[in-house]
Structures are given as structure tokens and as C-alpha cells.
Image (cartoon, rainbow, N blue to C red):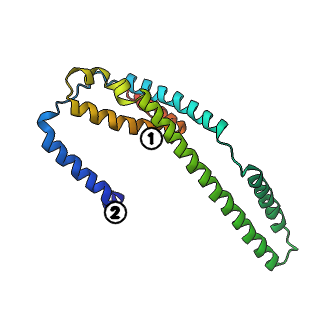
């Protein structure tokens, strides 16, 4: 909750959303969510997980790591340093020098890994946007299909579809691991209820 107070953009967006809802309340009829069942939710999460796996494999094939050879050399050097530091006959000054080299090599691996991960995340988001614009969407594509066609206004259709495009692209960019964990939690909760 503290993060919300420290983020003025989130507060502004919340205020604008509440104001827009109050202003447009009469023009926005309630959506019919009667078909929103646990089975539909799990099915949608399953579909999106499969799509995310395909996107992740596509990215792994086409986005190579040009620093892979150097990363392996740094890992090997870190392992060698760990073995050398364990030697009790080594002087303290030499140990300190080796440990500082190890820290520097680990930092290089982390920095380069984060840069690659960020590049992959941006590419995943772009692919997710393309999929969402082509019609694969989480909310309006699966869950709200009948309710959007029945009594929703044009403003609602536009808002839901716009949010859905961004949401779908973001979820696809996030990767399948998190959705897989979410599906496991949902299944566990439903099994406990039964």
C-alpha cells in the first residue's frame, strides 16, 4: 500500500478512473458476467499458457545471446577463484584480490543477463501486441464474448478491448511460469473448496 502512495501516476489514474465512472455511469450499463465460471477462467489461463510457451520458444530460437561464450568463461573463472580461495596457504592480500575479481565477474554476468532479459521482454511484449491486435485476447476473446455483444455500449466495447489488448500483451510478455503457478493455486483452492 505504501508503494501506491509513493506513485503519483497511480493515484492520478485512480482519480481519473473514478471521475470517468461517475461522469459516464449512466452511459455504461453493467456487463453480464454470468458465464464467468471457474472452468472458463482455468481454460483461458490454459490457452494463454500454451501461447506464452510458443512465444517463449520462438524468442529463444531467434534471440541469441552474443555474450554466451564470455558468460561461460566468467562462470568458469568464478569457479576457479572459489577453489583458489579455499587454499589456506594463500596470502590474505591475494585472497582479497581474487574475491574482488569474483564480485566483479558476478556483477558482469548479472548486468549482461538483465540487459538480455529486458530485450527479450520488449520483444515478447511486441509479439503479444501483434497477437492481441490479430484477435487473440484474454477478456473480450473468451470471457466476455456474449456479454459484450448483448447490452454493452460503444464506450464499454472500446474501453474493454483497449485494456484487453494491453493486458494480453503484458501477460504474454510476462512468461508462462507465473501463469502456470497461478493455475496451480486456482486448482488447489477449488479442490480445497470441494
Q: Number of labelled discs?
A: 2
Secondary structure under the numbered disc 2 in the rendered image:
helix
User: Which residue matches tag 2?
Assistant: 6
Q: Residues within 10 Å of mark 2 (few under 14, many from 20)?
A: few
Quarter occupied by the N terminus: bottom left
Residue 7 visible from this viewpoint:
yes
Q: CA distance from mark 2 to mark 1?
A: 23 Å
Quadrant the C terminus occupies? top left
- Which image quarter: residue 78? bottom right
Residue 91, above or below 130? below
Residue 137 rendering spot, x and y as whole percentages:
40, 29
Disc 1 residue crowd, few under 14, some 14–19, many 20+, Cα 10 Å: some
Residue 152: quarter of image: top left
Residue 187 placed where, x, y %? 45, 29
Residue for point 78% across, 70% down: 98
The residue mark sitting in front, 2 or 1, is: 1
Residue drawn at x 48%, y 25% as measured from the top left: 47
Between 64 and 178, the one lying in front of the other is 64
- Do the residues under discs 2 and 1 have CB atoms within 8 angstroms? no
User: Can I make out residue 194 in this image?
Assistant: no
The one nearer the camera, 10 or 184, is 10
Left or right of residue 145, residue 187 in this image: right
- The answer to whether 97 appears left or right of 168 in the picture is right
At mark 1, the secondary structure is helix
Q: Residue 2 at what x, y percent from top left? A: 34, 60
State the image quarter where residue 133 is shown: top left
Q: Position of residue 129 (x, y in %)?
A: 45, 36
Drawn side of residue 58 relative to residue 89, left or right: left
Residue tagged 1: 170
The residue at the far left in this view is 26
Mark with earlier residue (2, 1):
2
In the orientation shown, which residue stands out farthest toward the right?
89
Amino acid at each position: 500500500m505504501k508503494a501506491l502512495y509513493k506513485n503519483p501516476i497511480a493515484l492520478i489514474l485512480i482519480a481519473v478512473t473514478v471521475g470517468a465512472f461517475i461522469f459516464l455511469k449512466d452511459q455504461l450499463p453493467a456487463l453480464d458476467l454470468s458465464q464467468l465460471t471457474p472452468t472458463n477462467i482455468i481454460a483461458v489461463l490454459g490457452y494463454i499458457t500454451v501461447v506464452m510457451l510458443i512465444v517463449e520458444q520462438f524468442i529463444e530460437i531467434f534471440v541469441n545471446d552474443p555474450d554466451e561464450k564470455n558468460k561461460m568463461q566468467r562462470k568458469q573463472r568464478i569457479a576457479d577463484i572459489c577453489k583458489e580461495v579455499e587454499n589456506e596457504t594463500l596470502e590474505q592480500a591475494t585472497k582479497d584480490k581474487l574475491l574482488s575479481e569474483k564480485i566483479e565477474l558476478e556483477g558482469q554476468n548479472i548486468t549482461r543477463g538483465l540487459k538480455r532479459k529486458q530485450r527479450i521482454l520488449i520483444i515478447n511484449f511486441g509479439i503479444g501486441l501483434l497477437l492481441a491486435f490479430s484477435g487473440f485476447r484474454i477478456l473480450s476473446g473468451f470471457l466476455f464474448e456474449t456479454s459484450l455483444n448483448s447490452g454493452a455500449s460503444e464506450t464499454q466495447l472500446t474501453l474493454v478491448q483497449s485494456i484487453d489488448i494491453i493486458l494480453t500483451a503484458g501477460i504474454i510478455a510476462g512468461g508462462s511460469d507465473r501463469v502456470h503457478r497461478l493455475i496451480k493455486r486456482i486448482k488447489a483452492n477449488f479442490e480445497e473448496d470441494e
